[in-house]
Image (cartoon, rainbow, N blue to C red):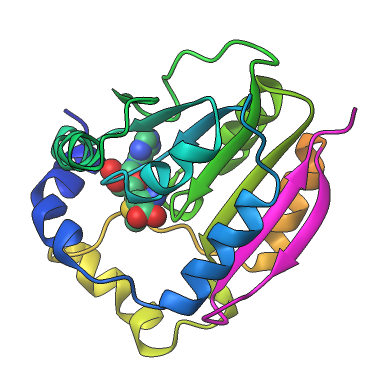
Amino acid sequence: MGSSAKFWDKIAQKYAAQPIKDEQAYAKKLEITQGYFSPDMSILEIGCGTGSTAIKHAPHVSQIRAVDVSPKMLEVAHDRAAEAGVSNVTFECSTVEDMDLKPESYDMALALSILHLLEDRQTAIQRIFAALKPGGRFVTSTVCVKDGFGLLGMLIPVMQFIGMAPFVAKFTATELEADFIKAGFEVEMNTKPGHKGVAFMVLKKPQ
Ligand SMILES: C[S@@+](CC[C@H](N)C(=O)[O-])C[C@H]1O[C@@H](n2cnc3c(N)ncnc32)[C@H](O)[C@@H]1O
């Protein structure tokens, strides 16, 4: 098992118990995302964690494939989906880097709090671009440490040293936007509904 899976496995129960930090921003992101949905849509979520967002979106679409590297996060996700009576979400244990992706097979992809955790973000973005149907959307919410995370941002290396933080790539929202454009996406929305260090973007694969 990779070090990333080990880290997330270790904190899965604690993560699952944490309340949403900014309810208002979270609700806004759900609302924007659901504005794009139609009942026939096939969705891919990478880094789905404990499945909370996929479960909220599930009633509005046909199916969701939710992928995460951590078996323990996925255990919580399975339990939560069963409790909610949601049966159109498939949870799968894989990395973004290794998961099997067929070209042009999804109407939308979601990456919520995951892109900053990847060592090769650009390749992941390119893989998502290829997996989307023409006109498909990529909805992302990403920690952009270089846009201002104050003391916490400065403490990341110390926390990593003592095993309390995973790998975190440092970039601004503008730099992230450039990565999406490089992969071929059009930027439909680039906003910060909550914390100034968290960018919410909607990218479109051209028709
Ligand atoms: C900060 S959590 C976000 C979880 C969820 N998306 C949310 O918004 O609550 C990051 C998640 O990404 C997963 N993850 C980290 N690196 C990954 C990778 N390379 N491939 C797939 N999942 C990964 C972790 O296991 C964890 O569940």
Camera-nearest residue between 159 and 18: 18
In the rendered image, residue 37, in percent from the top left (x then y), is placed at 65, 40
In the rendered image, residue 136, in percent from the top left (x then y), is placed at 74, 32
Residue placed furthest toward the bottom: 151
Q: Is residue 102 left or right of residue 190?
A: left
In the rendered image, residue 111, in percent from the top left (x then y), is placed at 51, 45
Q: Is residue 62 visible?
A: yes
Asked where in the image residue 49 lies, by quadrant, the reply is: top left
When the figure is inspected, residue 161 is found, relative to residue 92, above or below; the finding is: below
Q: Is residue 13 magenta?
A: no
Camera-nearest residue between 121 and 112: 112
Camera-nearest residue between 134 and 117: 134
When the figure is inspected, residue 42 is found, relative to residue 47, above or below; the finding is: above
Q: Is residue 183 left or right of residue 141?
A: right
When the figure is inspected, residue 11 is found, relative to residue 44, above or below; the finding is: below
Q: Is residue 44 left or right of residue 71?
A: right
When the figure is inspected, residue 161 is found, relative to residue 108, above or below; the finding is: below
Q: Which residue is rendered at x = 52% and y = 81% of the image?
A: 195
Q: Which residue is rendered at x = 64% and y = 34% of the image?
A: 108
Q: Is residue 196 magenta?
A: yes
Range drawn in magenta = 185-207
